[in-house]
Amino acid sequence: MMLIVNMVQGSFMATIAEGLTLAQVTGQSQQTLLDILNQGQLASIFLDQKCQNILQGNFKPDFYLKYIQKDLRLAIALGDAVNHPTPMAAAANEAGGGPGRAGPGSDPALSRQEEEFRWLLHAEVHAVLRQLQDILKEASLRFTLPGSGTEGPAKQENFILGSCGTDQVKGVLTLQGDALSQADVNLKMPRNNQLLHLAFREDKQWKLQQIQDARNHVSQAIYLLANRDENYQFKTGAEVLKLMDAVMLQLTRARNRLTTPATLTLPEIAASGLTRMFAPSLPPDLLVNVYINLNKLCLTVYQLHALQPNSTKNFRPAGGSVLHSPGAMFEWGAQRLEVSHVHKVECVVPWLNDALVYFTVSLQLCQQLKDKISVFSSYWSYRPF
């Protein structure tokens, strides 16, 4: 996509430059031309700033000509690979001093494309790898959150739980790295408005597997990138594609662990060690689940009631779900139970949002590099590279 965007930008600037020079040599006002363009459908901040710079004699480049031509040539090659003509891009490229069209049948063009490809393998790939490592190291720091320096225990952060739909549950969860170290929750029982206080035992922490897994996937991605230092020479585009696929797999898995909570059955929630974290112990008619969903730390409290043996209800055990609804049934021990009330509260964890942004940016960088490599792959479809 970036090739196409840069192709459009390069062609647009070539046309604007041509219009300004034509106005100049015919004795017409370049400023008037700019005013007319800015009052029409072509008006844009980009157009105004570029033309003002030109009129003021400021020719400092924002995007060097050699890089514009590189992307124009790659875009032309991409069009050739799918038999789609790109005459405007070819004209813009030729106006900048490059060949109008390139193809395997033209030896000078082929030589230039090969030179571009060697530069891509030896310079741009390593630049992208460095950028990826810097971004992922920042993402990794979000997961560790050290108290001081780079060592030592992670600092504790308190998050106030809330929901716009209920005030039955209120409380504070304390997150320390990838673990819940404290929980202080008040639950108002619907039947008698009794206030129930739930708190973690002081000697217990609850590890959040989603955060652990996401951090491990980020570490694996950093390891893959670090294995290709500045002195490493990529010999083929296929080698780069293989590395990008491996890195993107780890990043996708890291993102999915935060965006896709595990689906659990009610018996699995009942058997979870989380139910034994509280002091005093949870009442037998309560279940609690904690999970990450995107950038939010979520707490769900299920209130249960036992189904009588002579109940006329059709007993149908509920399957796995992230959030079970009232009426869901399950069997636990010798009892058949039904969910009577569900209370979900949550809080935003800012550094989880940062991590998700870093994952998205990194995946985009990987895909852009793959796209550039793939253009050469299509261009030289008659030979491996």
Image: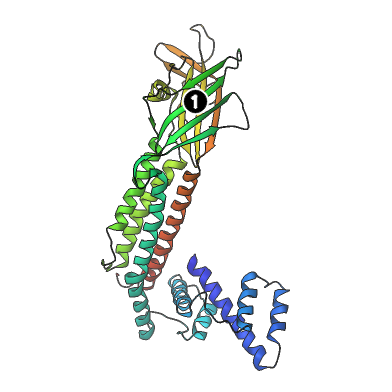
Q: Which residue shows up at 46% across the image and 84% down it?
A: 98
At mark 1, the secondary structure is strand
Q: Position of residue 299 (x, y in %)?
A: 50, 30
Instruction: Please tell me which residue lies in front, 107 or 335.
Output: 335
* Residue density around tag 1, few if under 14, some if 14–19, many if 20 or more, within 10 Å: some
Q: Position of residue 295 (x, y in %)?
A: 50, 42
Vertical side of 39 occupied by 190: above or below: above
Q: Which residue shows up at 64% across the image and 83% down it?
A: 55
Q: Amino acid at mark 1?
A: Asp
Q: Which residue shows up at 55% across the image and 29% down it?
A: 344
Whether residue 168 sits left or right of residue 130 in the image: it is right
Q: Position of residue 296 (x, y in %)?
A: 51, 39
Which residue corresponds to mark 1? 184
Quarter of the image that includes the C terminus: bottom left
Q: Which residue shows up at 31% across the image and 59% down it?
A: 242
Whether residue 100 sits left or right of residue 382 in the image: it is right
Q: Is residue 316 in sight in this rendering?
A: no
Vertical side of 97 occupied by 217: above or below: above
